[in-house]
Image (cartoon, rainbow, N blue to C red):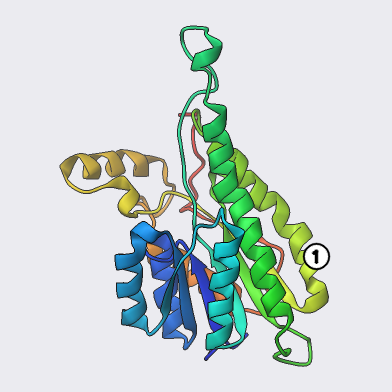
Amino acid sequence: MDITDASAIVTGGASGLGAATVKQLASRGAKVVIFDLDRQEDKGKALAAEVGGVFCAVDVTKTDDIVAGVDTARELGPVRALVNCAGVGMAGRTIGKDGQYSSAFNLDTFKWVIEINLIGTFDCIRIAATAMSQTEPLDESGERGAIVNTASVAAFDGQIGQCSYSASKGGVVGMTLPIARDLAAVGIRVNTIAPGLIDTPIYGEGEFSEQFKAKLQEGVLFPRRLGTADEFATLALELLTNSYMNAETIRVDGGIRMPPK
C-alpha cells in the first residue's frame, strides 16, 4: 500500500514508540497527524514541525477528541493509516497482604487502564476506519487503508502485578481478527504488534535506570538487550505497506518469555 501523500494517524505519537513511528511514516511520504494529550503538546508540535505533520490534542478516552483529530487528518489527505500507540500501565497485586477488601487492587484503576488501552484503541479504530471507508480504493483489490494496534507480550506472559495491563492488551489481541474480518468488506487491513521490553523514556535515565534495564534484558533470548523504538516502528511500517499482511499479531521481543515476576 502506497502511503505517499496520504494521512497517517499515530496515537501517543509525541514520544516513545509513537514518535519513532511518526518519523518512519514521514520518511515514506505520509502526512502524519500526531494524537497525544495536552501535556505532550510541546513535544508533539516540535515533532510535527520536524516531519511536516500536524499535532492534535487528543485524549483517546474522549470520542469528540478522536473525531476532531480524524477530521483534521481528512483535511490533509485521504486517511489511509492508523497506528495505535497510546497506552498506560499500572502495576498492583490482586489482593493486599492484610486480608482487607480495601487493600485489593483498586477497581477504578483497573477500569482506567482498560478504558485507555482497550476501549480507547477500539474507539480510534472505529472512527478512523469510518473515514478510511469513504476514500477511493487504491487498486483493483479494493484496498483503502490499514491499521496497526499495539498490544504487549504481557497479553501472553503477564507477570505478577500486571492484571489490568495484561487484560487490556489481551483484549487488543483478541479483537484483532474479528475487526480484520469485519473491515475486510471495505478494504481495510488490521494487524497488531506485541512488543517486548523496548527501551523508551518510561524507564527513566541515569545509573539506576541503566542497572534496572540491564536486569530486565537478562531474560531476552537474542539479541541480549532491550529493543528499540525504531525496531517497533519499522515493523509498524511494514504492516501498513505490505498489502498481504492482515489479521495477525506479531511479537517483536527478541524471543523473551516473561517469568512470573
Q: Where is the C terminus found, in terms of image quarters?
A: top left
The residue lying at 45 percent from left, 33 percent from top is 91
Q: Give left or right: position of 130 versus 159.
A: right
Mark 1 neighbour density, 10 Å: few (under 14) some (14–19) many (20 or more): some
The x and y percentages for residue 141 are 78, 87
Residue found at the far left of this picture: 207
**Closer to the camera, 61 or 195?**
61
The residue lying at 43 percent from left, 66 percent from top is 13
Q: Give left or right: position of 32 versus 239.
A: left
The residue lying at 46 percent from left, 42 percent from top is 89
Residue underneath mark 1:
181
The x and y percentages for residue 38 are 39, 60
Tell me if residue 61 comes above or below residue 24 in the rendering. Answer: above
Tell me if residue 50 comes above or below residue 220 in the rendering. Answer: below
Q: Give left or right: position of 142 versus 33.
A: right
Tell me if residue 188 comes above or below residue 106 in the rendering. Answer: below
The x and y percentages for residue 16 are 37, 60
Indicate the quadrant where residue 200 lies: bottom left
Q: For mark 1, give the secondary structure.
A: helix
**Closer to the camera, 242 or 12?**
12
